[in-house]
């Protein structure tokens, strides 16, 4: 009987451990945002830089250095912020219709509201794929998310 109680207690501790680890990792896997700003749906990252105006008057602009955006090849990214004291910028790439794994490069501060870095998109076996590139801007106590959508694997 003591052995059964011990096994039950170990099982409960393992379940508690999984819950705690999941809770701690959830912000990384599912980023929280205090403010979500939708970009102009007519803006196409495959053709142009895309910017949004924030409710307080600032702007966040995403620029992709290689067009069309390549698969399985590194390409440069730049985010420019104006009217906003950005401390950290990441760009979270996710497949809209297919899970493609964790892909969130953190961009390095370059001064004057500019953040730059490189990203790589995995290849999709179906060829054409809709992606969401969510720019995550941390500015002190506020985290802003700007979800840009684009399509890879087709004529632009």
Image (tube, grey):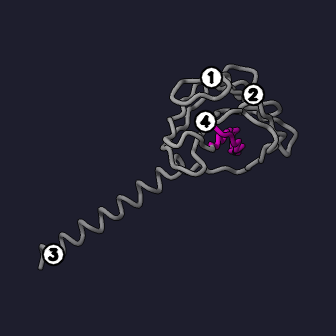
User: Range of the magenta residues?
Assistant: 131-153
Label 2: state its secondary structure: strand
Q: Which residue is painted at 55% across and 24% down in the image?
A: 74
Tell me the quarter of the image containing the N terminus: bottom left
For label 4, the SS is: loop
To which residue does mark 1 refer?
76
**Label annotation for residue 80:** 2
Report the Cα–Cα distance between label 1 and label 4: 18 Å
Residue carrying label 4: 153
Please give left or right for residue 60 compared with residue 78 in the image.
right
Among numbered discs 1 and 4, the one appearing first in the sequence: 1
User: In whole angstroms, how far apart are the C-alphas of marks 4 and 3?
Assistant: 56 Å
Badge 2: few (under 14), some or many (20 or more) residues near its Cα, within 10 Å?
Answer: many
* Placement of 1 over or under 37, stated as above or below: below
Mark 4 is surrounded, within 10 Å at the Cα level, by few (under 14), some (14 to 19) or many (20 or more) other residues, namely some
**Vertical arrangement, residue 93 with respect to residue 75, above or below:** below
Circle 3 or circle 2, nearest the eye: 2
Query: Where in the figure is residue 138, as x and y percent of width and height?
Result: 67, 39
Mark 4 vs mark 2, CA separation in Å:
27 Å
């Amino acid at each position: 009987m003591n052995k059964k109680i011990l096994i039950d207690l170990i099982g409960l501790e393992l379940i508690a451990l999984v819950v705690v680890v999941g809770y701690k990792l959830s912000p990384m896997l599912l980023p929280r945002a205090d403010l979500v700003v939708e970009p102009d749906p007519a803006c196409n990252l495959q053709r142009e830089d895309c910017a949004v105006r924030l409710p307080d008057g600032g702007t966040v602009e995403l620029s992709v250095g290689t067009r069309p955006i390549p698969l399985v090849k590194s390409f440069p990214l730049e985010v420019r912020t104006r009217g906003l004291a950005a401390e950290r910028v990441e760009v979270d790439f996710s497949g809209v219709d297919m899970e493609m794994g964790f892909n969130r490069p953190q961009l390095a501060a370059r001064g004057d509201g500019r953040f730059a870095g490189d990203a790589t998109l995995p290849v999709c076996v179906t060829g054409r794929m809709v992606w969401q590139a969510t720019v995550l801007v941390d500015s002190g106590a506020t985290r802003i998310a700007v979800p840009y959508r684009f399509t890879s694997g087709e004529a632009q």
